[in-house]
Image: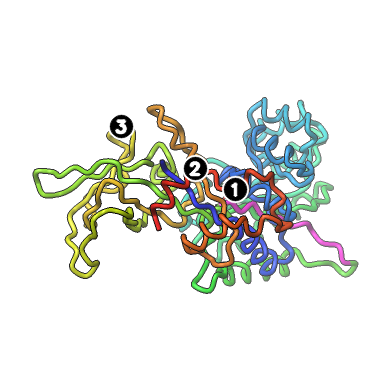
Amino acid sequence: MAANYLWVRSALLSLQAFTEKMPRVRPFYAVKCNPDPVMLRVLANLGCGFDCASAKEMATVLDMGVEAESIVFAHPCKRPLDLEFAIETNVTRMTFDCVDELEKVAAECPHAELVLRIRADDPSAVVQFGHKYGADPQTEAPMLLAAAKQLEMNVVGVSFHVGSGSQSCDAYPLAVEAARRVFDQAADLGYEMQLLDLGGGFWGRFDATGHVPLEDVSEAINSALDRFFPVNSSGRKVEVIAEPGRYFAEACTTMYALVTTVKDRPDGSRSYYITDGVYGSFNNLVYDHGSVTAKVLRGPGMPPVQPVETETRLPSTVFGPTCDGVDLIFKDVPMPLLRRGDWLQFPNFGAYTIAGACAFNGIPVDNPDIMYVWSEEPTGSWEHSVAMLRKGADKDNPALQAPEHHLCFVADLHDLESIC
Ligand SMILES: Cc1ncc(COP(=O)(O)O)c(C=O)c1O
């Protein structure tokens, strides 16, 4: 009963914008952000690489025909079974940030192409990683490089993650500069590193004209690359990749949830119960510091409601569908009066949402119906999208060489049609 509308074309537009703005940087989509099979397929067909954190993620993209060289196993503290899978499938590029991991990889996978993850925090990023991953570039990196040398391991590059939802244009240039210093330390030990991995952190919303506004951050990154990793006179340059997740996944998905129960409270406020919640896509409220913007969609065939200008608004609390009290989406927000059968629409809901959902209470909020749409418009009107899909338009688009059933509407159309 919860449903997602996934605007597949956004993958193409986001990828084009990324490579136009940062021609030296090849994106490796962070699968963890939203492992939707159609998104992955489209990105793979368009030449994107993949950042995988586990055997499952590696298997998913390898099964799509992605080459092992187009995968970076970017988990600095790997589980044994994931490492085993990487070895079996020849995924050799992998990150590390401590001696124990180095020893583990040296013992199991001596031919690994190691990437040293350094700490490079943007304090204003929405989600921080520095307390968990990343070696200090000044104090720890030299020691780790020396340890790697002693173990005769091949360290091929440096990675970092400035934090998810980075807000500052300074974060990447500072991190690139720190990476340069680590490259130089490595050169002193005889390493000739060739890979710089900028990690994730990029925002990805379309502006009013349908463009992804990447200007400021891309200019900052490009000039840092030119300064610290210039192309040398013989044309030789360091390979630069990034691991954007949110950038690709956030704006592509609009989520819809149905109002199933309305409760009038003695204090004059109201509670609503909807078909998705904190155990579903709204897990982002807990894990991703998510915020919620909702639009009300009236079910057709129901009595008319008050015009927006004069409508009554009551303090309203919206709960998810499980029996757990923490399954609360927002509290005491003034909202127009909803009826059972109305819908709430949540835009920009594709990043770190469905990826973290589970089926607690036997309610399959981790498996919403998904409607895949390949429309021209940045947001695609609902009517237009449904019409396009009915006509089967764009099924022949070469970027979308996904299995037929992925391109069809797999939701319960009856429910979603009632939105328009
Ligand atoms: C190693 C790594 N790379 C990339 C990403 C994607 O980050 P973002 O969604 O901010 O681009 C993450 C997110 O957790 C990550 O852990």
Q: Which residue is mark 3?
A: 324
Q: Which residue is mark 1?
A: 408
Q: Quarter of the image for the N terminus: give it.
A: top left
User: Where's residue 113, x and y in %?
Assistant: 78, 41
Q: What's the distance in space between the residues labelled 1 and 3, CA to CA?
A: 35 Å
Q: Residues within 10 Å of mark 2 (few under 14, many from 20)?
A: many
For the residue marked with disc 1, what is the amino acid?
Answer: Cys
Q: Which residue is mark 2?
A: 369
Mark 1 or 3: the one toward you: 1
Q: Residues within 10 Å of mark 3 (few under 14, many from 20)?
A: few
Outermost residue, bottom side = 209
Q: What's the distance in space between the residues labelled 3 and 2, CA to CA?
A: 23 Å
Residue stretch rendered in magenta on the structure: 235-245
Q: Reading the chain from its start, which is encountered first: label 2 or label 1?
A: 2
Question: Which quadrant would residue 20 be assigned to in this image?
Answer: bottom right
Q: Residue at x 76, y 26 (%)?
A: 108
